[in-house]
Image: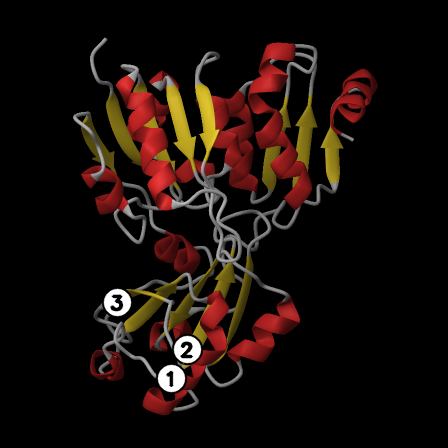
């Protein structure tokens, strides 16, 4: 048996409609999908019936699996001659440890399929661009893993000339980041923090940099979140187009004994809500495949709508509640 192929695929941000056509195609053909916690779990239901799902998620506080172990999982699957999709939230080439995973490959062919990065989604779904002729001629992507006395990632001189700063993975260090920015840029620089960008339960706070920490605490925004700083935020006027959609802020769980058309569910995302499916409830193989995925969704999402007939709801309760 020959060595398989690994596709490093960007899942995009929360809205599954932002998945690229090529990404959807390889997900549908994958033998194994190795995915992280920032992937919208509905996308996993685009996989074929016998596709193996392997979770390797991380968060700032708990690492489910270390990077060396993730590399080993990828290579072990590829050694079986499998078609592997390494599915990453956002774009795998932007703070996605792409180089580390590519360099760890042991003879497997690979390709990279970019995705829409979280910074773009956070800005656009909150009602402002990343660049603008009047306010911001350029944008800087940087990691938020900064120490209070370190400014190594940020070009403050460039920011002073009107750039936009997009900070990834910065919530744990938000207070320190604000101190550094205030010291270098002053207290009145516009800032935004966007939690769960482009999901139906997205939260956005807008403030000047000196008050952003208290606003974030008031809104109870936690990771994952993007920190955006710069005058371009002045382009936001009231609620964004996304926040005005009729089902924004609503979370729908769809349960069914029959197979649900995922494309119909994906279309509902155009209404601005969050939608998740647990279908074929009497199909034990399917429930076993997705059990961990379903359980994680039910653990973290507060659904205020459950759709399905009474029998489906009763089966769902027996299986998952």
Q: Give the structural element (helix, strand or loop) at label 1.
A: helix
Q: Taking 321 as reference, is 5 left or right? A: left
Whole-percent x, y for residue 97 in the image = 29, 48
Sequence-earlier tag: 3 or 1? 3
* Residue closest to the eye, 171 or 256: 171
* Residue closest to the eye, 135 or 93: 93
How far apart marks 2 and 3 lie (CA) works out to 15 Å
**Residue positioned 62% across, 72% down in the render:** 217
Q: Nearer the viewer, mark 3 or mark 1?
A: 1
**Residue positioned 60% across, 13% down in the render:** 259
Q: Residues within 10 Å of mark 2 (few under 14, many from 20)?
A: many
**Residue positioned 49% across, 67% down in the render:** 172
Q: Residues within 10 Å of mark 3 (few under 14, many from 20)?
A: some
Whole-percent x, y for residue 182 in the image = 40, 87
Quadrant of the image for the N terminus?
A: top left
How far apart marks 2 and 1 lie (CA) works out to 5 Å
> Are the residues flagged by discs 2 and 1 in contact, CB closer than 8 Å?
yes
Circle number at residue 177: 2
Specify the color scheme.
secondary structure
Q: Residues within 10 Å of mark 1 (few under 14, many from 20)?
A: some
Q: Give the structural element (helix, strand or loop) at label 3.
A: strand
* Residue closest to the eye, 23 or 320: 320
Sequence-earlier tag: 2 or 3? 3
Instruction: Check the image and report above or below for 193 versus 95.
Output: below
Q: Taking 178 as reference, is 218 left or right? A: right
The residue identified by callout 1 is: 180
Q: Nearer the viewer, mark 2 or mark 3?
A: 2
**Residue positioned 43% across, 36% down in the render:** 17
Circle number at residue 140: 3
Quadrant of the image for the C terminus?
A: top right
How far apart marks 3 and 1 lie (CA) works out to 16 Å
């Amino acid at each position: 048996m020959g060595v398989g192929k690994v596709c490093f695929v960007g899942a995009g941000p929360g809205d599954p409609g932002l998945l690229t056509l090529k990404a959807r195609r390889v997900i549908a053909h994958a033998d194994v999908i190795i995915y992280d916690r920032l992937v919208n779990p509905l996308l996993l239901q685009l996989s074929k019936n016998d596709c193996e799902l392997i979770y390797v998620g991380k968060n700032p506080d708990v690492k489910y699996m270390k990077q060396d172990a993730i590399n080993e999982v990828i290579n072990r699957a590829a050694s079986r001659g499998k078609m592997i999709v390494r599915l990453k939230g956002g774009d795998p080439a932007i703070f996605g440890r792409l180089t580390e995973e590519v360099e760890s490959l042991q003879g497997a062919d690979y390709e990279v399929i970019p995705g829409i990065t979280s910074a773009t989604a956070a800005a656009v779904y909150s009602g402002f661009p990343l660049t603008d002729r009047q306010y911001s001629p350029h944008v800087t992507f940087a990691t938020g893993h900064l120490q209070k006395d370190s400014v190594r990632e940020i070009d403050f001189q460039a920011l002073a000339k009107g750039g936009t700063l997009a900070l990834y993975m910065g919530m744990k260090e938000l207070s320190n980041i604000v101190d550094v920015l205030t010291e270098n840029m002053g207290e009145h620089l516009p800032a935004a923090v966007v939690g769960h960008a482009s999901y139906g339960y997205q939260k956005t706070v807008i403030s000047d940099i000196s008050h952003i920490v208290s606003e974030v605490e008031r809104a109870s925004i936690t990771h994952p979140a993007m920190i955006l700083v710069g005058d371009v935020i002045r382009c936001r006027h009231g609620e964004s187009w996304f926040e005005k959609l009729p089902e924004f802020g609503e979370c729908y769980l769809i349960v069914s004994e029959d197979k649900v058309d995922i494309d119909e569910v994906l279309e509902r995302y155009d209404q601005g809500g969050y939608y998740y499916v647990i279908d074929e409830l009497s199909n034990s193989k399917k429930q076993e495949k997705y059990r961990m995925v379903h359980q994680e969704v039910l653990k973290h999402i507060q659904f205020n709508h459950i759709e399905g007939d009474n029998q489906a709801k009763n089966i769902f309760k027996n299986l998952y509640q």
